[in-house]
Amino acid sequence: MAPPQGSRAPLEFGGPLGAAALMLLLPVTMFHLLLVARSGPARLLGPPPYLPGLEELWSPWALLLCLTWLGLQAALYLLPARKVAEGQELKDKSRLRYPINGFQALVLTALLVALGVSAGLPLSALPEMLLPLAFAATLTAFIFSLLLYLKALVAPASALAPGGNSGNLIYDFFLGRELNPRICSFDFKYFCELRPGLIGWVLINLALLMQEAELRGSPSLAMWLVNGFQLLYVADALWYEEAVLTTMDIIHDGFGFMLAFGDLAWVPFTYSLQAQFLLYHPQPLGWPLASFICLINAVGYYIFRGANSQKNTFRKNPSDPRVADLETISTATGRRLLVSGWWGMVRHPNYLGDLIMALAWSLPCGVFHLLPYFYFLYFTALLVHREDRDERQCLQKYGLAWHEYCRRVPYRIVPYVY
Ligand SMILES: NC(=O)C1=CN([C@@H]2O[C@H](COP(=O)(O)OP(=O)(O)OC[C@H]3O[C@@H](n4cnc5c(N)ncnc54)[C@H](OP(=O)(O)O)[C@@H]3O)[C@@H](O)[C@H]2O)C=CC1
Ligand SMILES: CC(C)CCC[C@@H](C)[C@H]1CC=C2C3=C(CC[C@@]21C)[C@@]1(C)CC[C@H](O)C(C)(C)[C@@H]1CC3
């Protein structure tokens, strides 16, 4: 049985109080957004149109659908993979192995959905079920986090995450105690991060598009754009699935309520906000403006993909010809840091690209409502906070070399601004 690590790691997210507040605030915000998106005024900062009763939130069918979805994605995860990748080295010097078959899961899901729809599956009825589905996903995430917490009680100390083991129940439940909770080779965090939530998000978007087609004869250009951009983002994440193995969530964060709720509920139900908004508030969009928005998305994607691939290639094999000529600085750990290429422009070029894309996803919704810009605002806050966490972790890992990197590359996310 693993002893708690005490409070060696500094507390993040405002400690236990912050964690408790976030556990309440995040689901409340998600339900607020779902209710407001379908209301006439669609005011992000106004009160919700009404407070739903339990009978509107709770539906055994929604829970069944939610669990069936998780079961389907788990089955697709277990199918033979085209490749098995190794993760980063762990505290005990071992490396975990991960199946690379996320894109295959996306394609198979698309085929199954297409088959289902042609056989009469009423996908366009899904938008009407968003509230009970979000409630079921929240309940599932809560119970799942509880099980993860209990599992961590019997995990060896070497399996625990650097944070999330303060000894405070609420804080540890929120952040997650175990770094890579698994049953046999089934890795819960890796599975949840990329499959049910991300694929669920594009499925909800598609259902909204289909309902718009039923309501108005055809989907609007704005709806096509939002669906297309977000499908590209999700398909990219699954195509470059291996790159997720070098992200902070996999390397550093435990698996607790924050990620379980984030992956299973927050991503599908709030990241589809623009499409939800467009269904109830159609926006005129002409081709010239649509082309300009596509250009913004393309620029964001180019930076995002370029930066993430460069770091991933470099971390996997620094002598790879694609990165071998880049300038680097050495660190005491033996790992080097890139100081040219994308990572010489700002210290988080991938965040910059991601933020530019986030803006492009909101622009098709016009400029007269703040609600569709929620994702951009939340994401800016998330990435600024995340960048700050990462800086502290890197300073701890690399010490003087990190100071040198900051001196050589002074801007964090936006060149000459931040
Ligand atoms: N859509 C969404 O909701 C979200 C999307 N994201 C996206 O996920 C992606 C991953 O983000 P995240 O995990 O936060 O962070 P990063 O992928 O940027 O990873 C940070 C790590 O990269 C390594 N690193 C930093 N600087 C350098 C350098 N100069 N040279 C080489 N390695 C370096 C360090 O780890 P080490 O040295 O140990 O390798 C550091 O800890 C981003 O594109 C982000 O935008 C993130 C959060 C939410
Ligand atoms: C709302 C809470 C306070 C925090 C929840 C955060 C999570 C929703 C995000 C944390 C990191 C994420 C990543 C992606 C999705 C959102 C979460 C889970 C990501 C899978 C999206 C697609 C990208 O291409 C990526 C780089 C693979 C992302 C990795 C991080």
Image (spheres, rainbow, N blue to C red):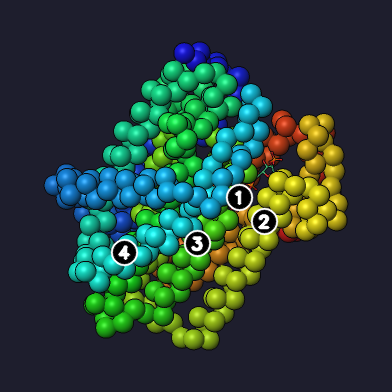
* Structural distance between the alpha carbons of marks 4 and 3: 16 Å
Q: Amino acid at mark 1?
A: Ala
* Structural distance between the alpha carbons of marks 1 and 4: 27 Å
Instruction: Sort mark 4 into few (<14), some (14-19) or many (20+) by Cα contacts within 10 Å.
Output: some
* Structural distance between the alpha carbons of marks 3 and 2: 15 Å
Q: Is residue 79 left or right of residue 56?
A: right
Marker disc for residue 367:
none
Confirm if mark 2 falls within 8 A of ligand 1. Answer: no
- Residue at position x 58%, y 56% from top? 240
* Structural distance between the alpha carbons of marks 1 and 2: 7 Å
Q: Are marks 4 and 2 in contact (CB under 8 Å)?
A: no
User: Element under label 1?
Assistant: helix
User: Element under label 3?
Assistant: helix
Instruction: Sort mark 3 into few (<14), some (14-19) or many (20+) by Cα contacts within 10 Å.
Output: some
Instruction: Sort mark 2 into few (<14), some (14-19) or many (20+) by Cα contacts within 10 Å.
Output: some
Do we see residue 262 in this rendering? no
- Residue at position x 45%, y 44% from top? 191
Looking at the image, is mark 3 or mark 2 earlier in the sequence? 3
Residue 152 on image: x %, y %:
45, 23
User: Element under label 2?
Assistant: helix
- Residue at position x 38%, y 32% from top? 145
Marker disc for residue 243:
1
Confirm if mark 1 falls within 8 A of ligand 2. Answer: yes
Looking at the image, is mark 1 or mark 3 earlier in the sequence? 3
Q: Amino acid at mark 3?
A: Ala
Q: Mark 2 highlights which residue?
A: 309
Q: Are marks 1 and 4 in contact (CB under 8 Å)?
A: no
Residue 245 on image: x %, y %:
59, 44
- Residue at position x 78%, y 47% from top? 318
Q: Mark 4 highlights which residue?
A: 113
Looking at the image, is mark 1 or mark 4 earlier in the sequence? 4
